[in-house]
Amino acid sequence: MAARAIYAPLVCTAALLLAFVVSPSAGLSLDTVREFLTREEDTIVFSLIERARYPLNRPAYDPIHLGDGAGPGRRLNASFAELFIRESEAVQSKAGRYQSLQEIPFFAYRVPFTLAPPYNFTRELYPAAAFVNVNDAIWSMYFNELLPLLAKNGDDGNYAVTVDSDLACLQVLSRRINYGRYVAEVKFRGDQQTYTSLIQAKDRDSLMKLLTSEAQEDVVKRRIEKKATVFGQSITSDGPIKTGVNNSSGTNFKVDPSVVYKLYDQWVIPLTKQVEVEYLLHRLD
Amino acid sequence: MDAAGGEQLSLAAVRDALVRLEDSVVFALIERARHPRNAPAYAPAAGGGGGAGWRSLVEFFVREAEALNAKAGHYQKPEDVPFFPQDLPSPLFPTKSSPKVLHPSASLVTVNDAIWKMYFDGLLPLFTVDGDDGSYAETVALDFACLQVLSRRIHIGKYVAEDSNSLMDLLTFKAVEEKVKKRVEKKARTFGQNVTLEDSAGKQQSTAGDSECKLDPTVLSKLYDQWVMPLTKDVEVEYLLRRLG
């Protein structure tokens, strides 16, 4: 799972080409970064709950077979999900979505212009490192590891809404994990000397150690597990709130809190740190 | 709505769907409330949108997103109704056909114009703060999510109207409505709360001050009381008129 720095032109707006001045933003601090990540937890839980409403719907993820069924037909390399997500991101791109660099799309586009009203975004990231991301790993993790844990077996044929909710999950996971760039930027500014020497030595292990706080990570994991329990409960207008936590069969969960814990423990937190390290390694370019 | 075997769709299944949709409505509004009003996203496009036929960024986005949905075979069910139905492309892939549980004219029933107006003119000012953070694309995408879930919820009225028992339910409607309003308010309070590890697990957290809530719970009860439930009834009436006509 290697992080990849994308230097390909993602969005061709003039503003991006001019942004080579790193303005020390008053807005970016350890507090604002923490606040953002905490708020993302709610979005992640909501989007997982919404995806879990639909069954696995595996045909949406298989390569598409075109043809009349009589002959061999023609097999595309892409699945319904990939085509839908590509097109969806293209529309969002035209609407101006990936201009601020806070979000990085899964597929690259050549957008000659955007229809969005202009806005003066503060460039907080170091330009040479701003495109660092692990979207390939997130894509693979989401479809191969998370989805089977999240959705029940079955096929209800509602592929459009299913993949729409997949995209919502992918977008928030990507935004949260690639936010490691902002985390790294804040940490770098907070202790430039230490980081600079480690970066110059390309000491990945020491950087990783410096960025890791197991106590903090434990808090985050336990909190999102709790959020999954709280937001996933069945609410009636009267009577006690059923959390389903004590349900032995576990079938009352809108989303299994232990799956959400595992998501953060095995993927979100490690991938975010990968982004942080990769960003730092480009920070002095 | 999927009729699990059999042609008749039970009112109980419809009720379940409506209750589950309440969660989706609350989630969608909470997520939209994360951004301020972002008025430029709704302003008329400078230069008339280059003759592309759209008036604002949100209209452009919804039209494009619905065209993609249509190609993906999305608008096959009576509760999935587009906001811009003219000239929608046909599905590119064969889609699983669902059993027809409603009268054919059901597809003609739509109150989406009213929903659109209600959402932008009535609802948005109630639950978003003034301001502009420049994230117009994310904002209109979140608006579309709200519009879709509200539209789905309201157009399920077609199924309610089809049920022959629903006339009886009209007599108890007031009590049902009160229950719904209380429940969505409770959901807004629960899902919009600030969850931290300091609170003891299992403690009823709905007593947390509404000021900490990401979404004002009274907005939800007003939304359902003034718009969702009346519009659903409009759908039921229109469906019945077409069905008999």
Image (cartoon, rainbow, N blue to C red):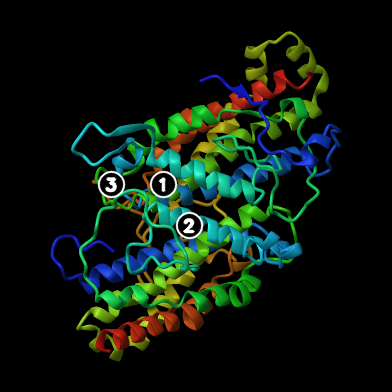
Q: Are marks 2 and 3 on the same chain?
A: no
Q: Is residue A209 above or below residue B49?
A: above
Q: CA distance from mark 2 to mark 1?
A: 15 Å
In the image, B204 versus B125, the foreground residue is B125
Residue lying farthest top? A201
Q: Position of residue B169 (x, y in %)?
A: 27, 85
Q: Chain of mark 2?
A: B
Which residue is found at the position 74% from the left and 30% from the top? A185
Which residue lies under the disc numbered 3?
A: A250
In the image, A239 versus B190, the foreground residue is B190
Q: Are marks 3 and 1 on the same chain?
A: yes
Which residue lies under the disc numbered 2?
A: B67
In the image, B195 versus B49, the foreground residue is B49
Q: Position of residue B72 (x, y in %)?
A: 39, 51
Q: Is residue B234 above or below residue A265?
A: below
Q: CA distance from mark 2 to mark 3?
A: 39 Å
